[in-house]
Amino acid sequence: MLGLTAASAAVLAGCAKDAPQDTWQPKGENAQKIHDLQWPVFLVAGIVGVIVLAAIGFVVIRYRDKGQPMPEQSHGKPALEIALTILPALILVGVGIPTASTIFDLADESDTECIINVTGQQWWWEYDYPAQDGCGGIAEPIVTSGQLVIPANTNVLLRLTSRDVIHSFWIPALNGKKDTVPGRVHTLRMQADQPGIYAGQCTEFCGLSHANMKMEAVALNPDDFQTWVGNQLEPYVSPEAGSQAALGEAAFTANCAYCHQVNGLSSTAPDGTVTPVLANPDQFVVSGAAPNLTHLMTRNTFAGATWDLLTDECRDRVWNASPEEFGALYLQGVTAECLNAVDLREWIRNAPAKKPMYASDAQKANSDGKVRGMPALGLNETQIDQIIAYLLERN
Amino acid sequence: MAMWMFLGSECLLFGGLISTYMLYRGRHPADLGPDQVFDIPFTSVSSFVLLMSSLTMVLAVSSAAQKDDRRTNLWLTVTALLGATFVGGQVYEFTSFYREGLGFTSSLFSSSFFTLTGFHGVHVTVGIIMLMALVGINKRGRIPGDKAEVVELVGLYWHFVDVVWIIIFTLVYLIPS
Amino acid sequence: MAIIERPSTPALAGSGAPAVVTPSQAYGVLKRPVSTTGWRSWVFTVDHKKLGIMYGVVAMFFFLVGGVEALLIRLQLAGPEGTVLSAGLYNEMFTMHATTMVFLFVMPMGAAFANYFIPLQIGARDVAFPRINAFGFWCFLVGGIFLNTSWFLGGAADGGWFMYQPNANALFSPSHGVDFWGLGLQITGIASLTGAVNLITTILNMRAPGMTLMKMPIFTWMSLVTQFLLLFAMPVITVALFLLMFQREFGATFFDVSAGADPLLWQHLFWIFGHPEVYIIVLPGFGIASEVLPVFSRKPLFGYRFVVFSGAAIGFVGWGVWAHHMFASGLGPVSVAVFSMATMLIAIPTGVKIVNWVLTMWGGKIWFTTAMLFIVGMIAQFTIGGLSGVTHAVAPSDTQQTDTYYIIAHFHYTIFGGAVMALFAGFYYWWPKMFGKLLSERLGKWNFWLMMIGVNLTFGPMHIIGLQGQPRRMMNWTEARAGEGFFNLGFWNRVASFGSLLITIGVILFLVNVWNTHKKSSTTPKAPLDPWDARSLEWITASPPKEHNFDAIPTVHALDEFFHRKYEVDHDTGEVRKIASAEEVLAAEEAKADKHIHLPSPSYWPIILAVSLPIMGYGVIFNRLLIAVGGVILLLAMFGWALEPSVADDSDYDPPVDGGGTSKELANIG
Amino acid sequence: MSTTADHVEHADHDHGDHGDHAPEAHAHEHKPDSYYVKIALILAAITALETSTYWVDFGAFFLPTLLILMAIKFVMVASLFMHLRGDSKIFSYLFYSGLILAIGVYVAFLATFRFFAST
Ligand code: HEA
Ligand code: HEA
Ligand code: CUA
Ligand SMILES: [Cu+2]
């Protein structure tokens, strides 16, 4: 079966439209290195497998009891034994050497050009871009979630850690996985040859919604990436007074902002003093963090990349775009026509009903009164409309 | 033989505990680390007591082999007393640490320290119970089978526990973090 | 005290004339005697054969439990966005599926065979410490029950079978499931540890005259290696479980990152145990394969010495590879490279085994009984599983594969294909020995083919879906990430679920087979004394064996002793001539029967001692008072045990010479 | 009986002799008590030396000295008090295999944490 799989995979890879997390279709230098190592190994394993299975088949057919006399009671032939011990050893030496060199190759960090901190928590990913000269220059730190945006054709260094339990960061088309362990920082190289979206999934079991902790890497060509950085650093624009969104801003400030940070959001007291609204999720959420929503609509997915912010059509348009067109389409973000309001509504109405989380009052009692995930907030439909209108402007 | 095997197995048990301690010994608030709390002279004395109990144990085994019941019982009792002194010392040590603020849950260092030495202490205690049971049963002449052998088995266990302490004493107490 | 006098008229083998035994002679799973003494003879028994059967029955029960859990998993994953189980329940399901299958099915089933057959294969009357043996069994049983009561007491463990920290600490897994898991495994662990001490002593000390280590049947050899692995691996998991318990129950912070802990500590401790564990799972299976193959190929095992040494080598190298489960956990390149190389090394001794098995069949005269079919199937499937193991050993490649279904495929091929198939071969091969009746070969072959096809349909596609990037431990998969081509997840997930149905039917056929063979009205004739023309010592006695195993302890002259008593080999021509029938061999042995056979007596203490443990377990979880209650029972039982009168004095049954044992063994070795 | 047994025969010259229920005699000769007392004195002296490191500075030799002294004590107790030296080899195999395994495994374990790297 393995031999078969390996052989047919080799043949069929490329022609079929496979699952987005196919591990046999590298789209970047690092994954390619792994692939260059693994396909010969699979081939060798396949060949050995076929030989052994064929030998079994042969013996079984050839030597079944057809009334032949009792066979000779031979106890073995040491020379043959030794030969058949050395042969696999040689094969393994052949496999071992390139394995070791690839291991060190992939651990090398000297040629990476920019740094992104990746933090896992139950059950979503936070990315923060420290201010740096790398990545074409980032003037101020950026915090986002769900979709990891990187410049294409650039070797990026991810610094991985976690705020609660162990997760594992994995974008199969770009590199193998690496666990994010609380209290430790691990590094992982990322490089994508072409602009596009690459699917990934948290692969270390991390509790209730482990299955819903996905992520995506988005590669943009360097110019588009600069545009994206610019967008992320755009200052906050208050909604037009009296609009749906303005009402939404108030609702958001009241119901959401103590967990979710929106940079630039501020509140005005009756006496006219303006104070910035600062979220303090550490008082409410076990991991001490909730996604930063400042530019929510620049990403295409939400809640651990499990649901789309785009309608199916719009989403397909982005995913299927050619590498040349991709950047422009992606940078459009989520527009009113393209917004997948259905899932977002459901989320805001009752998040734990949509994504299993640990947020009921009874459950909170077990964790110092804090939630894991986002609780149901008991908003009415009007409030939800207003909040969505407000969020739609977070682009 | 079974005892030897059991002890071989115990090597991995204590190995695990010691390794855990080694890994965590440096992880504590600055004012409550091993260097601050350990009272080396005191522990040296109790280590010495335990070491000497190995001597008395070996004398018990030797007397048992010579079928000298009275001496066997004597040495077994002395061994048990020395062991009890050691455990008593440990209890004292634990309480004094505790009074200095080092609880079981205070830090990783304290958790792993108490776990390791606690496991060892329990082993010593079990050994003491075995010794006393031996004396008791022996007095009533009810050790079935080969008496010398039973004494020797308990002896093996006892020495092993001592040997483990030799390691713990050096690695935990004498080598500062 | 059961002293068996020599039967006055030498009972002819298989004729069923009962020997004079106390208490009543009672065999057979399904037809336990109903007399009042009946159940007592099981509950208080110290007979290794009865304990073996009880291990087997209980393990089989847990196999069904674990199997039903597996079926629920497959049901959930048969389609996208499965809704059969909630997320929480799904997590409990795979955790308990794995825990049940590994700790409550495969390991004890290996113990069942080891218990039953090691004394028979080495020509001993019982194991070295029969009461400890009984204690071990009861620990396993009460531990297993304890573990599974968690389902009804607030939810089972939900951290995955390797229970990574900190996800399994009280903050992230607040139900008592993990407490049950840790304490339950601690209790079943006692069974493994005592079993290991016991069986190693038995094998090293109690072999029949003339049986040197290199004449020992290979199943016994592989069990010996297994027991050594258990002996040294159990304490490691014990440490880990204690740390877990101290953390969850007493507020220690071993895995609490905010206190500065390193979560990798748990991973190391678990896998230092965990990798030897996988060989603990498979080595008994290797042993069975190495017994069955020569018998049905009518040839000695090819390269016996190589098979023995490779087994020992596997046992040894298996200690140096644990971190291959942690290639993605951030060990750093040096460690990864070292463990990657070490892991590859282990393919060599394992390869030796495969090669020798094939060469055993080579040039043979192969008789395809059900047992043989299972072994041939096992070799093929284990090879596939082993080779995918080698692809994981290539660490960079493993970072793409780890925690995907490709891993699930790997280990189900090695475990189901390797260990479980071999265990089923063991059932069919040894059934006539254990119960004096043959299982139906016709049903057996259906059983085999359904399982063989089922396993490949279930776990074969998992290679594909794994390489297509479906991670494990996900309560659902989505259409959006399923792809469309030939390798799409949807189709292959359905195939896998369908395959598990075939396995189920296979298992049911096995149960039907057992039922048919043993039901009251069964017309199944008694099995012949030597239905397979077998080769090793356990066949030189009645089927089922008498309580005292052998009328006279046979003297061993050769590997495959029984074969050499039946056949004569002409050195020059290589011709093999039959010189005696099994009946004749047995009659010759009975003529020499020992006059005065001394067996250990049943005892109350093992079960009482064992029962005190879960009481303390519940105490730790719910009410500290119960700890005291359990503790008192424990102490009383220990003293009762120690003071129980000796049985060993006036016998011609040699007690294990050193008479060793743990503290519990002060008074007598019984 | 002419069997293949004879060419299996050469295989076995290991501990097979335990097979025939041969009692493993505890036949170490009995040492006088003074012998054990002497050993104990040596052990005591070593312990004294060890603890003296608490007051006296051994400099760079500190760690190795301690470890060596510890090992000496260990071996003395194991081989002399526990009679490993006089007993059947198989006992020491059983025990030392556990010990060596434990040392090997746990040293590797600590090494993966870079335990030995800095200090
Ligand atoms: C019975 C159980 C069993 C057995 C026998 C094995 C055998 C092997 N296993 Fe497996 N393994 C598991 C059970 C088992 N495994 C389990 C349960 C897990 C997952 C646990 C979890 O995560 O839940 C696991 C996971 C696992 C991993 C970690 C994967 C991951 O999580 O990322 C790795 C990595 O190296 C691995 C490797 C191997 C290797 C190299 C062997 C070798 O011993 C195989 C050797 C055999 C052969 C190679 C075939 C025959 C040889 C020849 C025909 C000779 C010629 C061959 C060559 C030249 C290559 N196994
Ligand atoms: C001994 C080990 C063993 C065995 C035998 C099995 C057997 C099976 N396993 Fe198991 N499995 C593991 C060990 C084992 N597994 C481990 C260690 C894991 C990892 C868990 C983790 O990630 O933590 C795992 C995980 C695992 C998963 C992945 C779950 C996930 O990651 O999300 C799946 C999915 O398909 C699966 C399926 C199966 C199936 C279909 C079988 C079948 O072969 C089962 C066949 C048996 C039966 C079908 C029983 C027959 C039932 C009846 C006849 C019913 C009759 C009923 C009555 C009489 C009441 N297993
Ligand atoms: Cu995060 Cu799984
Ligand atoms: Cu492994």
Image (tube, rainbow, N blue to C red):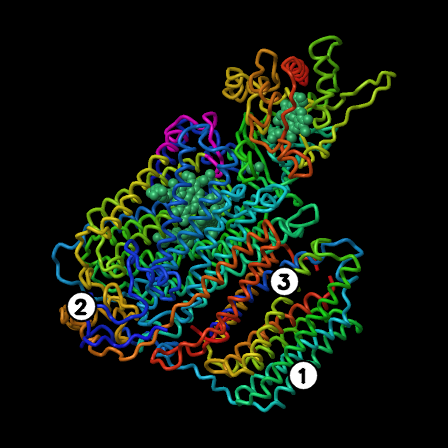
Q: Which residue bears the numbered disc 3?
A: B18
- Of the 4 image quadrants, the one containing the C terminus of chain B is bottom right
Label 3: chain letter = B
Image quadrant where residue C554 sits: bottom left
Residue type marked 2:
Ala
Q: Describe the element under mark 1 as helix, strand or loop.
A: helix
- In the depicted structure, whether residue C279 falls above or below residue A341: below
Residue shown at 74% from the left, 69% from the top? D60
- In the depicted structure, whether residue C190 falls above or below residue C265: below
Label 1: chain letter = D
Residue reaching furthest to the top: A242
Q: Which mark is residue C582?
A: 2
Residue type marked 1:
Ile
Q: Which residue bears the numbered disc 1?
A: D42
Q: What whole-number distance in Å separates the C-alpha atoms at marks 3 and 2? A: 56 Å
> In front here: D54 or A76?
D54
- Report whether residue C392 is seen: no
> In front here: C508 or C284?
C508
Residue type marked 3:
Ile
Q: Judge whether residue A22 is colored magenta.
A: no
Residue C260 placement (x, y as % from top left): 70, 49
Q: Judge whether residue C474 is colored magenta.
A: yes
How many other residues sit within 10 Å of disc 3, few (<14), some (14-19) or many (≥20)?
many
Q: What whole-number distance in Å separates the C-alpha atoms at marks 1 and 3? A: 26 Å
- Number of numbered tags placed on the structure image: 3
Q: Which residues are magenta?
A: C469-495
Q: Describe the element under mark 3 as helix, strand or loop.
A: helix
